[in-house]
Amino acid sequence: MKPRRKANKGDQLSGQLEGELATYEQVGLFQHSVTQKTVYRYRGILLQYQKALGGVRPSLTASQTFLAHLRKQGYSPSSINIYRAVLKGFHNWRGEVLEFQLKIPHHTPKYTEPELVTTILSLAQKKPRDYAALRLMTDAGLRRNEVTTLKVRNVGTKALRLRGKENRDRTVPFTKELASALKPFIQGKSPNDLVLGIKEGALYRLVKKYGKMAGKPDLKPHDLRHSFATRLLERGVNIRVIQELLGHSDVSTTQIYTEVAGNHLEDAINTLNKETDGKKLTWSELIRKSDSNAPKWVQAIDKISRNGKNCVIRRDGTLEEA
């Protein structure tokens, strides 16, 4: 049986919160920068919690018991983590600290090949709105809800100015392609107008459509945000800079991309190793294997190493025997 993930849709929209939970809904909950969809989900969790209390006042012990019950019911750790976050917010509002130990499995994002990104952008070029939406994710790393809620006032002359999770502000400079793609959608509009006017569901289907056309039917919007991060990392951009561009509060969240890039590079080398049929190659031979036109400095190093001699690299980049 698949673990339950969230509150039923009916519970999110119907039912009346009471007492402190009602006050928190009206005051405390909206102190956070969250979407309306997230508010509904949080409300559903608070209603479930209220029902479980059975008329008893909320307390730290009651919240811990509720979370433990969800674990026994087979809720996934990731889902329980959302419940815990909602209840932590409630208790923080009351000036309390909720503690509940939870081991969350580590999920590494899927690697999205740069060639795939190039393909879907090429396929979407004749549809300006689709192309601009995709560029916002591939060239600026926007989340799905950030694409759908992007307003004209967020688009500067050289960069996007965004406010993401937990009211964190970030600035993401334009690529030339993104600036060009957005231009038709901001001209003649007021600052509070939406740039693209696309719904989250439509954006999800859009990405799936182009993913299928490119041979990747399971492609999702967040995969394109991941590709933005991993491509920056592979080009040597500092992890702290990537953290700032993505709007992560903790660099440990950004560091998962080092594992994605590392796995990708390891897979590439493993492919080369398979081509040698078990024969161990020298470092320079591996390079030549991946590129028959190896740089001259690689060839020079290889030539000297074959003779069993050491070499040094001079300041002008030439090599000589040590």
Image: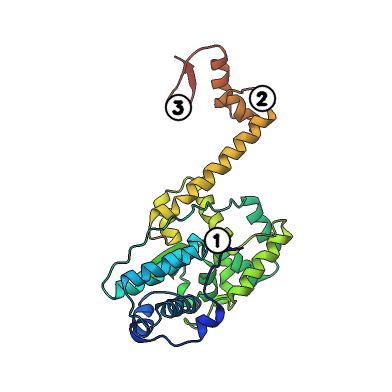
**Residue 45 horizontal/vertical position (percent):** 46, 75
Amino acid type shown at disc 3: Asp
Asked whether, in this view, residue 250 is left or right of residue 305, the answer is left
Name the residue rendered at 62%, 69% in the picture. 204
User: Which quadrant is home to the C terminus?
Assistant: top left
| Residue closest to the eye, 165 or 25 | 25
Q: What is the tally of numbered marks visible in this picture?
A: 3
Compare marks 2 and 1 and give the one earlier in the sequence: 1
Amino acid type shown at disc 1: Lys
Q: Is residue 48 above or below residue 106?
A: below
Q: Residues within 10 Å of mark 2 (few under 14, many from 20)?
A: few
Residue 47, by quadrant, is bottom left
User: Which quadrant is home to the N terminus?
Assistant: bottom right
Amino acid type shown at disc 2: Gly
**Residue designated by label 2:** 278
Mark 2 or mark 3, whichever is nearer to me: 2
**Residue 316 horizontal/vertical position (percent):** 45, 27
Q: Residues within 10 Å of mark 3 (few under 14, many from 20)?
A: few
**Residue designated by label 1:** 176
Name the residue rendered at 31%, 74% in the picture. 59
Asked whether, in this view, residue 224 is left or right of residue 216, the answer is left
The Cα atoms of the two marked residues, 2 and 3, are separated by: 38 Å
Residue 226, by quadrant, is bottom right
The Cα atoms of the two marked residues, 3 and 1, are separated by: 35 Å
Q: Residues within 10 Å of mark 1 (few under 14, many from 20)?
A: few
The tag on residue 316 is 3
Name the residue rendered at 61%, 25% in the picture. 285
Q: Secondary structure at mark 2?
A: loop
Mark 2 or mark 1, whichever is nearer to me: 2
Q: Secondary structure at mark 3?
A: loop
Q: Is residue 127 above or below residue 211?
A: below
